[in-house]
């Protein structure tokens, strides 16, 4: 069964030079199609505040999981909006390798565990939203540097 979201996003994934894709605050539902992994020039991705289900496709991260640790392979990524979905599990410390990342929004999910101190490696980061999750422990001192 193909969801309307899959049909829309699959058709958008054909131009491999696409750099920005914002689909935030729509009524998109179903899984994120793996064809988005064909967007090798993608720098900005926004899919928050929708009704998306399932895992982030392995084609976007080269690995399966809730927030795949090898999402860090998208080294040109400047914006990552994953807020207001159903993501769970820990924040992968490997996200600290996304040194071009300027905006990271993970709020309003079901993320657990501590905030990784490796996020201090995000030297270009301007905004970091992680509220409305089940995170625990201290805020890493390194984030304030």
Image: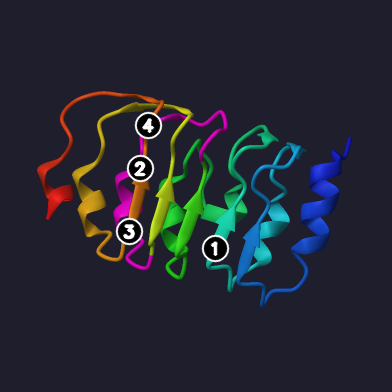
Q: CA distance from mark 2 to mark 4?
A: 16 Å
Q: Nearer the viewer, mark 3 or mark 2?
A: 3
Q: CA distance from mark 3 to mark 2?
A: 19 Å
Between 65 and 115, the one nearer to me in the picture: 115
Q: Nearer the viewer, mark 1 or mark 4?
A: 4
Q: Crowding near pointer 1: few (<14 within 10 Å), some, many (20+)?
A: some
* Residue 60: quadrant of the picture: bottom right
State the image coordinates of residue 133 (x, y, percent, origin top left). Answer: 40, 26
Give the vertical position of 71 relative to 112 (above or below). below
Q: Quadrant of the N terminus?
A: top right
Q: CA distance from mark 1 to mark 3?
A: 14 Å
Specify whether residue 84 is painted magenta.
yes
Q: Secondary structure at mark 2?
A: loop
**Label 3 sits on residue:** 126
Q: Earlier in the sequence, mark 1 or mark 4?
A: 1
Q: Magenta segment, which residues? A: 83-100
Q: Earlier in the sequence, mark 1 or mark 3?
A: 1
Q: Residue at x 48, y 53 (%)?
A: 80
Question: Which mark, by number, is residue 44?
Answer: 1
Q: Earlier in the sequence, mark 4 or mark 3?
A: 3
Specify whether residue 18 is painted magenta.
no
Question: Which mark, by number, is residue 92?
Answer: 2
């Amino acid at each position: 069964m193909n969801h309307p979201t899959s049909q829309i996003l699959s058709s958008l994934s054909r131009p491999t030079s696409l750099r920005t894709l914002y689909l935030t605050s729509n009524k998109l539902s179903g899984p994120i199609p793996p064809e988005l992994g064909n967007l090798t020039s993608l720098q900005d991705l926004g899919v928050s505040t929708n009704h998306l289900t399932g895992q982030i496709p392995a084609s976007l991260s080269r690995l399966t999981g809730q927030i795949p640790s090898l999402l860090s392979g998208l080294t040109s990524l400047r914006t990552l909006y994953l807020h207001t979905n159903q993501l769970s599990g820990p924040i992968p410390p490997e996200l600290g390798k996304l040194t071009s990342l300027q905006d990271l929004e993970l709020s309003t999910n079901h993320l657990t565990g501590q905030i990784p101190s490796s996020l201090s490696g995000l030297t270009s980061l301007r905004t970091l939203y992680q509220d409305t999750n089940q995170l625990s422990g201290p805020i890493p001192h390194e984030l304030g540097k």
